[in-house]
Image (cartoon, helix red, strand yellow):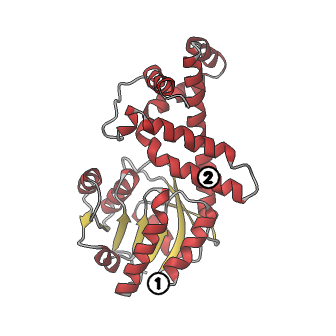
Amino acid sequence: MSIETVAILSPGDMGHAVGQLLREHELRVVTCLAGRSQRTRDLSESAGITDVANLNDMVAQSQIILSISVSEMVPSICQEVAAAIKATGADVLFGECNAIAPQVARRMEPIITEAGGRFIDASIVGSPPRNGSSPRFYASGDNISEFEGLADFGLDVRIAGTEVGQASGIKMCYAAMTKGSSALYSELLMAAEMMGLSDFVKAEFQSSQPAILQRMERGLPGVPAKARRWVSEMEEIKDTFDHLGLTPHLFQGVADMYRMIGSTSMGDETPESRDTERSLEETIMVLAEWVQAHPA
C-alpha cells in the first residue's frame, strides 16, 4: 500500500505533533475539526494539518487513520469511524493508538473490520515529537506491514507481535510506572506538607534518593495540566490488571489522585498555558491546601 495521506483523530498534544512530523516527511495529513475546541484547532493549524469538512471526507481521503485521543473517547471514535468506512467504502487502515486495556483493543477490532476497514493495535510510549524525534509506536495485529510503512515517514515503529492487545499491554505496563510514580510522589509530598514535614522529607530524598528528588522537581509542576486526561488512562490500567487477576485498587487510587489534582485551579491549565515558573514547593502547597479545604 502506498501511503500518501494520513488522518489524525485528534490533533491535540500528541496528535498535532505526530501530524507535524509526518508532514515534515512529505505526507499529507488531514483531520476533521468539527466540534473540536479552539485549542485543538490552534494546535492543528500550527502543525499545518488540513481540516476537511466531515468525517466521511477524512476517511475517504486517507490510507491510514491514527486515533490519538483520550481513553474514554475510544468506543465512540471507533463507532464513528466505522460508520464513515461503511458510508464511503474506504480502503483504510485504522491505527488505535490510545492508552487502552488490551481487552478493549480486542473489542474495538471487529467494530472496524466488520465495517470494511483494517485494524492495528498501536500504542504510543514517549513524549510528543520534537526536533524530528518520534515516540515509540508499538504495533500488533494482522496488518503490521502496512503500519510499519510509517517508519519511512519519521515514526519510530516497533513490532510487538501479531495479536491485538500486545501493543496496548506494553503501554499499560509502562504508564503504570511513569504516571503511577508521579501520583505516588504527589501524594507523599502532599502528606508531608500537611504534616509540616516537607523540609525533612525532601532532605531525606536529597540525601538518599537525589535522582528521585530531581525527577519530582522537574516533572510534578507540569502534572496538573495533564491530570484530567490521565484519569481515564489510569482506569484502563486498573481494568488491565483486574482482568489479569491482579488488584484493581492500586490504580483506582491513582485515578482518584489525578481526578483530585484536576479539580484544583491548576487543573484548568494546558501544557501551553501552565505556569512554567511554578516550583515543586508551590505546586504541592496548592494541592495540599485544596485537600484541606475539601475534606473527604
* CA neighbours of label 1 inside 10 A, class few (<14), some (14 to 19), many (20+): some
Is 278 drawn above or below residue 92 in the view shown?
A: above
The quadrant the C terminus occupies is top right
Looking at the picture, tell me which residue is in the foreground, 79 or 279.
Answer: 79
Is 176 drawn above or below residue 163 in the view shown?
A: above
Can residue 160 be seen?
A: no
- Residue 91's x, y, as percent? 41, 84
Residue at the extreme bottom of the image, as rendered: 89
Q: Amino acid at mark 2?
A: Ile
Looking at the picture, tell me which residue is in the foreground, 206 or 148.
Answer: 206
Q: Amino acid at mark 1?
A: Ala
- Residue 272's x, y, as percent? 31, 40
Residue wearing tag 1 = 115
Looking at the picture, tell me which residue is in the foreground, 150 or 66.
Answer: 66
Q: Secondary structure at mark 1?
A: loop
- CA distance separating discs 1 and 2: 28 Å
Residue wearing tag 2 = 237
Kindly identify the residue that appears in the image at 41 percent across and 60 percent down.
154
Are circles 1 and 2 on residues that touch, CB within 8 Å? no
Report which quarter residue 203 is drawn in: top right
Kindly identify the residue that appears in the image at 62 percent across and 46 percent down.
252
The quadrant the N terminus occupies is bottom left
Q: Earlier in the sequence, mark 1 or mark 2?
A: 1
Residue at the extreme right of the image, as rendered: 245
- Residue 28's x, y, as percent? 29, 69
Can residue 108 be seen?
A: yes
Looking at the picture, tell me which residue is in the foreground, 256 or 110.
Answer: 256
Kindly identify the residue that appears in the image at 42 percent across and 22 percent down.
279
